[in-house]
Amino acid sequence: MNNTIKRTAFIVLLMFSVSLSLSAQYVSGDDLEIKIAIAGPGDELYFWWGHIALVICNTRTNENNFYDYGVFSYKNADFYYNFAFGRMYYTSVRSSMESNIENYINNNRDISLYSLDLSPREKEIIYWEAEKSILPEFRDYQYHFFYHNCTTRLLNIIDAAIDGQIEKYFTNQSGRFTFRQHVRRHSWFSPFFDWILNFWMGQDIDAAIPVWGELFLPSEVGRQFVNFQYIDSDGNLRNIVSNVETLNHSVGRPIVLDAPRTQWIIELVFSLILAAFLGFLFFIQVKFPAAGQVLLGITHSLLGLFFGTASLVLYFLSIFTSHDYTYHNINMIFCTPLLLAAFPLGIRYAVSKNYYRRIKTEFLLRLLWLLTVIGIFISMLIKLSPSYWQDNLTDQMLMLPIALVLSLEPFGMKRLLYRIFWRFL
């Protein structure tokens, strides 16, 4: 009798456990709310273009899950090596919505929730695709800034639930800006990073793109989704966004520009001011030769080190890595690693006590900068062909006045040519 009771109790307990397990695994679209969380720029460079995540709320279990497709760690094996060669690996994680929202608010970032108006069936598809995306065999992916990032993975999940209507519609709509222009809308406030990032990026990101391409940016998803309509399973036309809830407005952050500003004029003015200063250094050398020699030598060294290093990185990115947005970059014509030679030559010029040795060093320095001037004009001619056009006027205008003064400054050039002519004839 006791054995019978024990067996019965065990069977009941087992059935109860199985029932709880099946209940926990069962998900009904009627119980789900699908949202998109869009965050504005943050402090770190990789946060300047915002962030996005998929939010799935289960009203039956009171679970609010945050599916994040933009997670990476510096502690990953060979992180810096892979990053240098363009092999960035990101992962997908699920965490608490509340803790993530709190984190964005504490970090003074914009954060909004876009509620999606979907059928129960479509919600279930998104739920199971989201759960699948965080499994070990699917969660890791090779990141690409424009084509495969936290936004594109999320869009693909939502798009699959409504039979590809998002990609189909936005692929046929012309975009507002190019990839480069979108990048500069977010980086404009930092002159150095704005210049160097765009100096490294080649002509491939200057082609016209559809709106679907622009959706690599989280903010563009929000902008386009509020007006997007799709056809549901019953054939009805529905707005995909039913509500937008703003949870936090950042305070004191640089704005994201509605349109990219004309940057080359600012670069040209800055370069002209620097060129005038360089001309003043040549004037000092005429009046005070020793002081002018030291100041000019140091200036050659610093400018050569800066532009030469930037060029060396560009050549490395374009030739040896998978950073394909740096390919086909005509900046390589006029800004080359040869400029690094100005660093030791400038030091040699500054400390040289032998007059003819200094003249020879000055000739080599002027030749380096003259090659830069010639390269800039060649790159301008190349851009006359639409096939080789690149939006790099900012780079050309920054370097042209500086290189012109350092190569063709009239006072020193007259003296230099006279000494060379007298020396060899």
Image (cartoon, grey):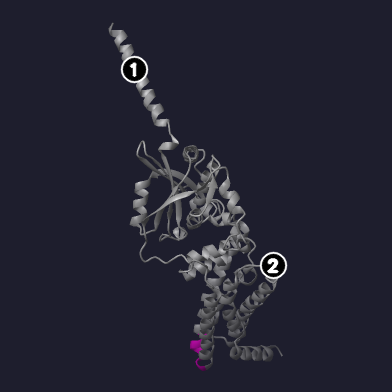
Can you give x and y, in whole percent of width and height, for residue 227 in the image?
50, 55
For the residue pair 138 and 414, the one nearer the viewer reads as 138
Q: For residue 333, what is the image quadrant?
A: bottom right
Can you give x and y, in whole percent of width and height, for residue 299 in the image?
51, 79
Height in image: 289 above or below 78? below
What residue appears at the point 67 percent right and 70 percent down from the top-left corner? 383
Q: Residues within 10 Å of mark 2 (few under 14, many from 20)?
A: few
Circle 2: element type: helix
For the residue pair 233 and 43, the one nearer the viewer reads as 233
What kind of residue is marked 1?
Answer: Val
Height in image: 104 above or below 10? below
Q: Is residue 202 magenta?
A: no
Verify CB contact (< 8 Å) between mark 1 and mark 2. Answer: no
Can you give x and y, in whole percent of width and height, for residue 365 in the image?
60, 79
Label placed on residue 12: 1
What residue appears at the point 33 percent right and 12 percent down from the top-left corner? 7
Of marks 1 and 2, which one's residue comes earlier in the chain? 1
What residue appears at the point 38 percent right and 58 percent down from the top-left corner? 109
Residues at marks 1 and 2, CA–CA distance in whole angstroms: 77 Å
Q: Residues within 10 Å of mark 1 (few under 14, many from 20)?
A: few
Circle 1: element type: helix
Height in image: 208 above or below 62? below
Q: Is residue 10 left or right of residue 175?
A: left
User: Where is mark 2, residue-wise?
Assistant: 386
- What is the span of residues highlighted in magenta in the rendered image? 287-293
Can you give x and y, in whole percent of width and height, for residue 78 in the image?
50, 49
Magenta region, mostly helix, strand or loop? helix
The quarter in which the N terminus is drawn is top left
Q: Is residue 289 magenta?
A: yes
Q: Report the residue that reaches farthest toward the left.
A: 2
What kind of residue is marked 2?
Answer: Pro
For the residue pair 23 and 203, the one nearer the viewer reads as 23
